Amino acid sequence: MKRPLDPFPGDEASAFALENVADAVFAVDRDFIVRYCNLAAAEVARCAPEEAIGRTCREVFGVRNCRTVCVLRQSMDEARAIANRIVTLKRTGCPEVPVSISAAPIWAMGGTVIGGVQVFRDLSGGGFVSRLAGLQPLDDFGTRDPQLSEIVRMLPQIAQSDSTVLLLGESGTGKELFARAIHKLSQRHGGPFVAVNCGALPEQLMESELFGYKSGAFTDARKDKPGRFALAEAGTLFLDEIGDLPYAMQAKILRALQERAFEPLGGVETVPADVRVVAATNRDLGRMVAEGTFRQDLFYRLSVVVIRIPALRDRLDDVPLLTERLLGRCRMAVSKNIETVSPEAMARLMRHDYPGNIRELENIIEYAAILCQGQTIELCHLPEHLRGEAGACPSRCGRTMAEIRFQAASDAVERHGGNRNAACRELGISKDTLRRILGRRDADD
């Protein structure tokens, strides 16, 4: 006989725990009437928890593909728990969100299933509840740093204006994340967000990529092609690495910003541009102006609102918070129950200066999660340049990194009965990478 479970928290400690977890949790009876809803689930439903009680979960959450992805129904019908089922939730007016759903039946004393409880967790990398609810994920900027906290506080006001914004910060500090937040918080949130890396565009194609071209503009131009300004109509155009723009191209961007219009390559008519521009760079535009490599008039046109994003080394107190968020992603990406980082490993992370900023920290945690076989990331799981000579795990002393990778990969393959696809999903690597890791060791032998 199954032990009866109480789906509704009966003590203060369990109630507090469920109310404050980031994952959305709710419980229903056999008629799919919501009997419990935590704060995260209520935010998805856009109502207070008590307003969800007594309504069907389909009515509360409004998921369009509810019947086809109902893990909760399957769990209750088959009287078994289902863990980590990957599905895509679709809500009217909201982006599709990939989630991991776990569900379990709730048993009465006599062994009858009387309901079920479901937990859903984000797999897309942040802002899960806000995207599913159609709200803006300002919680993506969780920080203890006073300077960054002030920027986040001002962001909604900045977004509501239609002024050009210039984001300044080193590579990897999250400038595009800020640009997307500005777009989502603005009156243009219903329009497109178009991102362009100016440093990645070949100079000879830059004008046609940004402004488009008309049929016959050059030999292969057989039909009109819209540029990024046209594609961002009624939305936001994010010009990343704008400091890499060639000097001649800067004049064309300036004219588009001043006149809110542009001419496609080969065109004879001016096309209006209803576009809000957010620009970003990791370069010192003021110094470039003084050197004559960046137009002063464009610099002033871009600098209506300037946001300076601090480097991670200037806010090291955020490393534990960021690490916890990144671990949350890694738990699902590599299908491991990694709970924490050891004090020794965290001390080493806190001493690093992060030239690659948050992007570097993300790569470090992902690397460590792949190597970690337990619940705690230890010093020996960190990349070699971080762990130093004292960073060898007791069970791995004297082993090279290639040997450690081989062991981790072969162990994963063995755990999945030789299924390499499943091993790749656990490790978060491609089949080619797995083949390379195992093949290189075989060649060495």
Image (cartoon, rainbow, N blue to C red):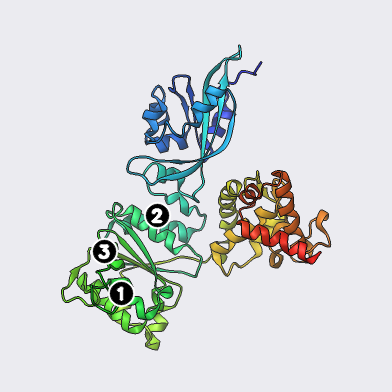
Q: Which residue is mark 2?
A: 153
Residue type of the residue flagged with mark 3: Val
- Viewer-nearest of discs 2 and 3: 3
Q: Residue furthest left?
A: 269
User: Percent position (x, y) of residue 153?
Assistant: 40, 54
Residue situated in front as seen by the camera: 103 or 304: 103
- Viewer-nearest of discs 2 and 1: 1
Q: Which residue is mark 1?
A: 208
Q: Between marks 2 and 3, how big is the CA–CA gap?
A: 24 Å
Disc 2 and disc 1 in contact, CB within 8 angstroms: no
Q: Between marks 3 and 1, how big is the CA–CA gap?
A: 17 Å
The image shows residue 288, relative to residue 98, as above or below, that is: below
In terms of secondary structure, where does tag 3 sit?
A: loop
Label 2 packing within 10 angstroms: few (<14), some (14-19), many (20+): few
The image shows residue 106, relative to residue 217, as above or below, that is: above
From the viewer's perspective, tell me whether residue 219 is left or right of residue 243: left
Nearer the N terminus, badge 2 or badge 1?
A: 2
- Viewer-nearest of discs 3 and 1: 1
Q: Between marks 2 and 1, how big is the CA–CA gap?
A: 38 Å
Q: Which residue is mark 3?
A: 275
Residue situated in front as seen by the camera: 201 or 15: 201
Q: Residue furthest top?
A: 110
Disc 3 and disc 1 in contact, CB within 8 angstroms: no
Q: Residue at x 56, y 57 (%)?
A: 318
User: Percent position (x, y) of residue 252?
Assistant: 27, 78
Q: Residue at x 78, y 64 (%)?
A: 400
